[in-house]
Image (cartoon, rainbow, N blue to C red):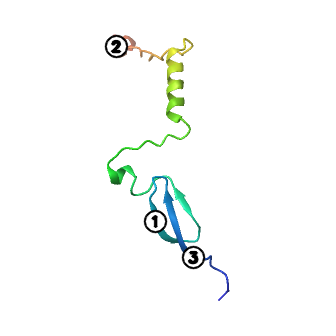
């Protein structure tokens, strides 16, 4: 077998933003995560919003700007089909 083929598998710590730490085995050192099993809403029953970069605020600003602007396109209306009775001929 070839020597030094596999990476080093060592004990490492996974750290969550909430402060939870878990010891596990990995090829990487010092893993950091945003959400773990202790703070994940599915397991805790508590809702937690993770808003990266103010996406909700940006969306609300765009929504308000589009509803206020007068340049909004008019809603499309359906064209009426000619009635079938008027196309028939009497014999």
Kindly identify which residue carries mark 3.
9
Position of the C terminus by quadrant: top left
Q: Nearer the viewer, mark 1 or mark 3?
A: 1
Q: Between marks 1 and 3, how big is the CA–CA gap?
A: 16 Å
Q: Of the residues under marks 1 and 3, which one precedes in the sequence? A: 3
Above or below — where is 40 with respect to 49? below
Give coordinates of residue 13: x percent, y percent: 51, 66
The answer to whether residue 38 is left or right of residue 6 is: left
Q: Secondary structure at mark 3?
A: loop
The answer to whether residue 1 is left or right of residue 73 is: right
Q: Secondary structure at mark 1?
A: strand
- Report the front residue among 15 and 61: 15
Q: Which mark is residue 22?
A: 1
Position of the N terminus by quadrant: bottom right
Check contact, mark 2 vs mark 1: CB within 8 A. no
Q: 10 Å neighbourhood of mark 1: few (<14), some, or many (≥20)? A: few
Give coordinates of residue 24: x percent, y percent: 48, 70
Q: Secondary structure at mark 2?
A: helix
- The residue shown at (45%, 16%) is 77
Kindly identify which residue carries mark 2.
85
- Report the front residue among 26 and 80: 26
Q: 10 Å neighbourhood of mark 3: few (<14), some, or many (≥20)? A: few
Q: Of the residues under marks 2 and 3, which one precedes in the sequence? A: 3
Q: Nearer the viewer, mark 2 or mark 3?
A: 3
Above or below — where is 30 with respect to 39? below
Check contact, mark 1 vs mark 3: CB within 8 A. no
Q: Which mark is residue 34?
A: none
- Report the front residue among 54 and 15: 15
- Say which quarter of the image contains residue 85: top left
- The residue shown at (37%, 44%) is 47
Q: Of the residues under marks 2 and 1, which one precedes in the sequence? A: 1
């Amino acid at each position: 077998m070839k020597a030094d083929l596999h990476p080093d598998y060592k004990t490492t710590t996974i750290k969550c933003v909430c402060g939870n730490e878990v010891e596990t085995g990995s090829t990487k050192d010092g893993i950091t995560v945003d959400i773990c099993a202790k703070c994940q809403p599915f397991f805790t029953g508590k809702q937690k919003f993770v808003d990266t970069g103010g996406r909700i605020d940006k969306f609300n600003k765009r929504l308000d700007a589009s509803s206020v602007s007068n340049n909004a396109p008019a809603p499309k209306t359906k064209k009426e089909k000619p009635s079938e009775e008027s196309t028939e001929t009497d014999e």
